[in-house]
Image (cartoon, rainbow, N blue to C red):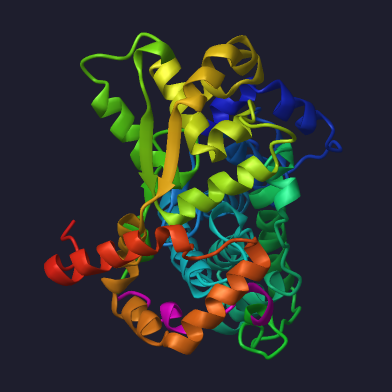
Amino acid sequence: IAAVHASARSPDMLHVLSALPPSTGPATIVATGRRVPPAEAAFVNAAFSMAQDFDDIIWIGHTCHSAVFAALAVAEAEGKTSQDLIAAVVLAIEIAGRIGGSTFFGPLNGQMWTFIHLVAAAAATAHLLGLDAERSTHALAIALAQPPIALQPAFFQPTSKFLAAAVPAQIGVQAAYFARAGMTGATDILEDPKGFWKWFAFRPLPGVLSDLGTWWAMQTLAIKTYPACNYFQTACTAIERACATRWPEDPDAVERVTIHTTKLGFEAMGFAHEYAGGAPPLLTALGVGFDLALTAAVMLHARRLTGAECEDAWLRDHAEPLRRWWQRIEVIHDPALTMRVFDTPWRIEAGRNALRGLGPRELWQLASDYRTHYGSTLASPRELVDWIRAGIERVRHGAPEA
């Protein structure tokens, strides 16, 4: 919430906010104090939150834009207690995180799983409205009736990315109110042959929806330390630690920087380059957020990475040294790190069951699907030796404990 309040300094977001039609209601827009209906408050607060890029990550999805701000808006509007609010947030994170996990093998990933905000907002609102199991089921089904699909051209360069959580959060809040009024939804919306999983999962993992109250998705929650892609956080921390006693004076003091990352981080960077609009680097806030080499360049030049270094004016003023830093930085995919991505679901029974169901045929089909939808390969010939080496190392020493 503090991050959303800080975002009031963003002229771009304030300009967008001023374009909304005037309205009044019982819920508060955190950045301005304006009072509006709860669905509108959830929408605006989620957009401000998304703009900051200091969001959360759980296994797997960025749930809190909607889980927190839908719950906050409805709790305020309905006069609920702080205990009610906390319970709604936890419930929303658990349900939305599992829906995201069920589509882990699918055409979308990370912040582009915008549909989890439908579920988070609907679940939080249903709880705060006191809906019973049947009405809550319909709230979730109504929210998923027409799920938004995030498109990469709208996500990797323009500021329309800010709406990725806002639009579905608003729909989710409204869905629960509709359910309270008697509207019904398709309760088999997930598994129907023409339903949700048909479009959002190459191979759905329904097992991760189980064990509510036994394992907690929320226990995997972390908040970003840096305003950049979640997959880049470890690299940023490593740079700070490596340079803790002595920062290089300028790019000429460094021969090269090599950063190893997961397949997820490597692919995110590839998408950023695709939408750079010319030769990279893309010197915008979204470029800093999705090009790991540029993220590192900003940190090495500024000796920190905060919202101030993501402002367009700052990036323009420091363009020349940033390009020089960027040219010295190489980012490579490390299969050993990608293997660790799968260690998290492997530690829970639902995740193990989901991964055990993947035989050679399913893996081959997944590789084909990723090639078709992403234009990329899960394992390139260049990486084959590294995959074999990582596999041998894993057999010898097993999965890491931490």
User: Is 234 rendered above or below residue 144?
Assistant: above
Determine whether, in the image, residue 371 is placed left or right of residue 332: right
- The x, y position of residue 172, in whole percent, is 67, 62
Q: Is residue 201 inside the magenta stretch?
A: yes
Q: Quadrant of residue 238?
A: top left
Front in this rendered view, residue 299 or 21: 299
Residue drawn at x 66%, y 82% as measured from the top left: 198
In the image, 93 versus 194, the foreground residue is 194
Is residue 6 visible to the viewer in this orientation of the structure?
yes
Counting from the top left corner in percent of width and height, residue 109 is at 56, 60
The foreground one among 309 and 251 is 251
Classify 18 as above or below 204.
above
Residue drawn 34% across the image and 67% down it? 342
Q: Is residue 159 magenta?
A: no
> Which segment did they paint magenta?
198-214
2 or 297: which is nearer to us? 297
Kindly identify the residue that appears in the image at 52 percent across and 72 percent down.
Answer: 105
Residue 97, percent across and down?
Answer: 47, 65
- Relative to 392, residue 34 above or below: above
User: Is residue 211 at all visible to an observer of this figure?
Assistant: no
